[in-house]
Each structure stands twice: as structure tokens, then as C-alpha cells.
């Protein structure tokens, strides 16, 4: 059996992570190409004498609801969701390892098809009910149900059977080998939902009034505006110090200004331009480069769409038309982050994989070919979020596509509405991005490329992706995973379900007065140990 480190060992690793800079090997920041960003230089946690105060965080997109699987990533409510639910596992980005959190241990069979989870003893939900293996099994069933619309659905469906061994032990049997299965339990699927309380409340009430095993409980919640969380006095991890406030601020520029003005003590910034501003201001925080973090979604047939982009030639034309370095330069971002590949070159899995090249002539030929063969006039509608940086990207992408024969109309919508439309297929072309984690990019990529995948907003349905993803998940080590990513990239270059134009750069700025915050996957911040030191 293969064993994840014990909870006691995990505490030591976490302390080291918080005292080091927030970059990893291979990151340009780590190699001296840019200044590093430091996490708060201490490993302390909340104690009773430090209780009190309020930490306010400016979010990028606020958690849409507390329904299962909605807070998968930091850019879309991960911190809020994890604060209320906690998670079974935590990814330690500095140590590049998974650590038990609500769990006591996690072990796998030698072929990675059977995983055994043991829970901490004595953990209770905020309503006083004990955390049990049956609650874990119930939670996985919720994520599997398409009606739940969980962003973790694709990964959870890889669990073929769950068996409750005893009140604190559960066994997962997978449909096929998955060497990085712990990533599932470090995300929103690891946010355990109490069966009795959920069934008593019902899904609609639960979405606003959840019960979790996390460090905080919901005091008030105005969707898309503000959320207030209060300390959970029965939290298993010890005293909880602050009240948390989350506020929706339109755009990273406004968020950083609010951080500088002291209106928020934690701010979620997206884009290298804003990370650079934070560095120049000597702000502390955590920075993550996300593979495929900036892309153009193309509707391959989602939501009943039957337009020109169902033809792969049209999608290839879009892909070849994008001058990625010019695009990021126009946006004031670092052109070094421009790429058409699925993996960032800072990823520990990167091995020279290349995406489609800029080829304006080929893009022009494909558009002309389609116009000649069909009655299509070149028109496309580009959905853009109503934030300054997204508007700027829309204008630049329109110019590049129009130059090869497209006729692009820009449609602007509020962030929450635009996000909802992407997930329901109510768009033709849209600017977006994947919030991958270098803990396991395969998890997010699979969800965006597999039929029925929770993040498959393009509607792509190609069996070649299923074979490539299966091989990737079964790969037992980093070297074999590198080759599997190369194979996946080759399939992606042929099908072109969406066009990557850059790595994502995400930074969470943290005021010097805020201590005890720790990162996990996809720029999600954990506040269970947080406190304010004046």
C-alpha cells in the first residue's frame, strides 16, 4: 500500500511552506527572471488570545452558491467554500505533496485503483453531528449526480464503487488507475456534506444555508455582492480567530487599489500585470502560474449550438489567427506567458509540448474555404465579461480574427451572467481560462475535454481525448506523465476545442497584519489558522 503522509507530518510541511516564497521550481520567479513574492514569514496559527477582528477579501468571482462542487478553484469562490466545509486533503505547493486535513490518512493499492481513506476521529459538523465515512460516501454521490451540476463531477464519476468499511474508513474503487487521485479530495469533492442535514434542508435552502466541518459558518450572504463568515466554536482544528468578509470587486485593478487603500486585507488578482504591480509595491502573497489559464472558448456544439464552429476548420482558423505575444502585450501582461500549449513551461510536467503556431495565411485560407462552401458570412459573436481587462482582451481578439476574414461582434455581460452562459452553452466564442493546478493539471484538463465533463463548456466530444486522458491518469510517475501530456497535446492540436493564448497568472495579496493563511490547489486560500496581528 502507498501512504500519504500522516497529519502530524503534514503540520511540519505546512510550516515550511508558509515561511518560504510562493514560487516553485521551474517558475520564472524562482529562477531570477523576476522578483519573487513572499508569503508571510511565520508559521503561527490562531490561538485564543488572538481571537477577534475582521479579515476582508476582495474576490475575482464570488462563490455562486454553497451547492456541492461550486467552490472548486480560488478564482471562483474556493476560499469561501473551503472556509465553511474544510477539505479532506490539502495540496502543499511548496513541498509538492498532498497532506491529510479532515482525513487522518489516505492509502492506495499498488496499481492505483483502490484508495482507502481514514477520517480524523472526533470531528463534528457545525451543527454538532459527527463526521462519518457515510457522509463522505453521500457527498460523492451528490457530485456524481448531473442534476447537482458539480464542477467536480467528471473526476468523481471515476469512482466505480464506494464502500463504507467502518464509521471512519471508506474505500474507493476506481474505474481505471489514477495515480494522483488525492487531488480529487483536495478540491471541492473533499468538502464533506452531512447527509442528514442536507436531506432535511433540501438543495435550494442548502445553497444559502450550508452546514460544514470547516472553521467558519455563514452569517450573511448576498450573492455577487458580499458574504460574512463567523468563527465555528466547535472547529476540530482549534480556536478560530477572525470574522471573514468576502466582497465582489469588478476587476483586478480595482481590487489591488482596494488592497492598497486598506479596504481589503486579502485580494485576488488575475494577470501578470497586476502581479507585477503587487511586487513593485512589495506586497506579500501567493502567486501561481496556471496552465491554459487564458484561452478562447469555442462552442463545439454545447447547448444545441449548430453554428460554424462545429466545423473544426473554423476552430483551427481561430487558433492560427491569434498572435499571442502581441495580445498579451496589448493587455499589459508579460509576453513571456504567451503560449498555445496546454502546459505552462513552468509546470513540473512540461517537456517541450507545443500547441498550434501563429499562421495568419492558413487562418485566412480556412475562413475563405468555409465561406465558399457554406452560406456563412464570417460572423461570430464574442462574449466578454464586464471587467476592464476582459473588455481589452475582447477588442484585441476581435481585431485579430477580423484580419483573417471573420466578422466579430462583441457582447458584454456581467461576470456572473457570462460565467453562467458559458456553462449552459449559451455563447459562440468567449474569453475564459482553466484554473488548473500543478498538483495535477490532468484533473482540470479531463473535465474540460471529456464528454459530459463539468468544465467542458465547449461541448467537445472526441474519443481520442478519452484515450489520452486515461493514459495520463494511469501514468505512475512524473516522467511517464510528461509523455502522456505530449500525446494529449497532439490530439488537442488536431481537434482544437478551444484556443489557449497564455498561461494564467494568479496572485493573492495578503496584508502584513494577516497571519496564518495557507494555500492549496488552484490559488484557494485556507483561513482556518488565520489571525490579525496589529
Image: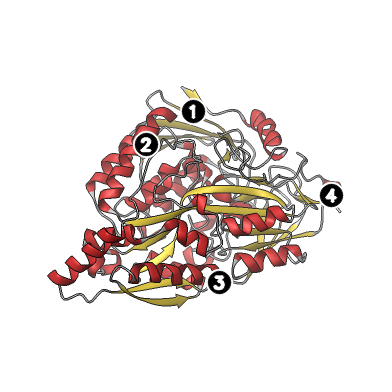
Q: Earlier in the sequence, mark 2 or mark 4?
A: 4
How far apart are labels 1 and 4 at the CA level? 36 Å
The correct choice, above or below, for 192 with respect to 53 in the image is: above
In this rendering, which labeled residue sits more in front, label 1 or label 3?
A: 3
- Disc 4 is placed on an element classified as helix
How far apart are labels 2 and 4 at the CA level? 44 Å
- Disc 3 is placed on an element classified as helix
User: Is residue 404 found left or right of 128 in the rendered image?
Assistant: left
The correct choice, above or below, for 532 with respect to 61 in the image is: above
User: Is residue 130 found left or right of 470 in the rendered image?
Assistant: right
Residue tagged by mark 1?
A: 107
Residue tagged by mark 2?
A: 473
Residue 191 is situated, as x and y percent measured from the top left of the image, at 54, 49
Q: Residue at x 64, y 39 (%)?
A: 122
Toward the viewer: 523 or 360?
Answer: 360
- Disc 1 is placed on an element classified as strand
Residue tagged by mark 3?
A: 388
Q: Earlier in the sequence, mark 2 or mark 1?
A: 1
Amino acid at each position: 500500500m502507498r501512504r500519504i503522509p500522516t497529519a502530524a507530518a503534514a503540520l511540519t510541511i505546512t510550516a515550511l511552506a508558509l515561511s518560504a516564497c510562493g514560487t516553485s521550481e521551474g517558475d520564472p520567479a524562482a529562477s531570477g527572471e523576476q522578483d519573487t513574492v513572499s508569503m508571510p514569514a511565520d508559521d503561527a496559527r490562531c490561538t485564543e488570545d488572538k481571537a477577534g477582528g475582521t479579515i476582508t477579501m476582495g474576490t475575482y468571482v464570488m462563490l455562486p452558491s454553497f451547492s456541492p462542487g461550486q467552490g472548486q478553484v480560488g478564482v471562483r469562490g474556493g476560499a469561501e467554500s473551503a472556509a465553511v466545509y474544510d477539505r479532506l486533503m490539502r495540496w502543499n505547493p511548496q513541498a509538492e505533496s498532498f497532506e491529510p486535513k479532515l482525513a487522518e490518512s489516505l492509502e492506495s493499492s499498488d496499481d492505483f485503483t483502490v484508495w482507502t481513506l481514514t477520517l480524523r476521529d472526533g470531528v463534528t459538523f457545525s451543527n454538532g453531528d459527527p463526521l462519518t465515512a457515510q457522509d463522505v460516501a453521500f457527498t460523492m454521490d451528490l457530485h456524481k449526480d448531473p442534476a447537482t451540476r458539480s464542477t467536480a463531477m467528471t473526476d468523481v464519476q471515476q469512482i466505480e464503487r464506494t464502500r463504507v468499511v467502518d464509521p471512519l474508513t471508506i474505500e474507493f474503487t476506481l474505474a481505471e488507475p489514477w495515480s494522483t487521485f488525492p487531488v480529487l479530495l483536495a478540491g471541492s469533492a473533499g468538502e464533506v456534506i452531512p447527509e442528514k442535514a442536507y436531506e432535511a434542508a433540501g438543495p435550494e435552502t442548502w445553497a444559502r444555508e450550508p452546514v460544514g466541518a470547516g472553521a467558519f459558518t455563514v452569517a450573511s450572504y448576498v450573492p455577487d455582492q458580499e458574504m460574512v463568515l463567523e468563527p465555528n466554536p466547535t472547529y476540530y482544528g482549534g480556536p478560530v480567530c477572525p470574522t471573514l468578509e468576502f466582497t465582489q470587486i469588478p476587476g483586478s485593478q480595482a481590487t489591488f487599489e482596494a488592497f492598497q487603500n486598506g479596504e481589503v486585507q486579502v485580494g485576488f488578482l488575475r494577470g501578470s500585470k497586476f502581479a507585477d504591480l503587487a511586487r513593485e509595491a512589495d506586497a506579500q502573497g501567493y502567486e501561481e502560474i496556471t496552465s491554459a489559464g487564458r484561452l478562447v472558448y469555442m462552442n463545439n456544439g454545447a447547448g444545441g449550438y449548430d453554428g460554424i464552429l462545429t466545423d473544426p476548420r473554423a476552430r483551427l482558423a481561430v487558433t492560427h489567427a491569434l498572435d499571442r505575444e502581441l495580445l498579451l502585450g496589448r493587455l499589459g501582461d508579460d509576453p513571456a506567458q504567451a503560449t498555445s500549449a496546454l502546459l505552462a513551461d513552468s509546470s513540473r510536467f512540461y517537456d517541450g509540448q507545443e500547441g498550434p503556431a501563429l499562421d495568419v495565411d492558413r487562418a485566412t485560407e480556412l475562413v475563405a474555404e468555409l465561406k465558399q462552401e457554406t452560406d456563412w458570412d464570417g460572423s461570430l459573436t464574442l462574449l466578454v465579461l464586464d471587467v476592464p481587462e476582459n473588455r481589452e482582451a475582447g477588442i484585441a481578439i476581435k481585431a485579430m480574427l477580423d484580419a483573417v476574414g471573420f466578422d466579430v461582434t462583441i457582447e458584454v455581460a456581467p461576470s456572473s451572467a457570462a460565467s453562467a452562459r458559458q456553462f449552459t452553452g449559451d455563447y459562440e466564442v468567449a474569453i475564459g481560462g482553466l484554473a488548473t493546478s500543478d498538483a495535477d493539471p490532468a484533473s482540470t484538463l479531463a473535465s474540460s475535454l471529456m464528454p459530459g465533463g463539468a468544465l467542458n463548456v465547449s461541448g467537445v466530444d472526441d474519443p481520442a481525448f478519452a484515450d489520452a486522458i486515461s493514459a495520463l491518469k494511469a501514468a505512475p510517475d512524473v516522467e511517464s506523465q510528461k509523455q502522456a501530456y505530449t500525446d494529449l497535446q497532439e490530439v488537442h492540436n488536431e481537434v482544437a476545442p478551444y484556443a489557449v493564448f497564455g498561461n494564467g497568472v494568479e496572485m493573492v495579496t495578503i496584508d502584513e497584519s494577516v497571519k496564518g493563511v495557507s494555500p492549496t490547489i488552484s490559488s484557494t486560500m485556507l483561513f482556518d489558522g488565520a489571525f490579525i496581528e496589529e
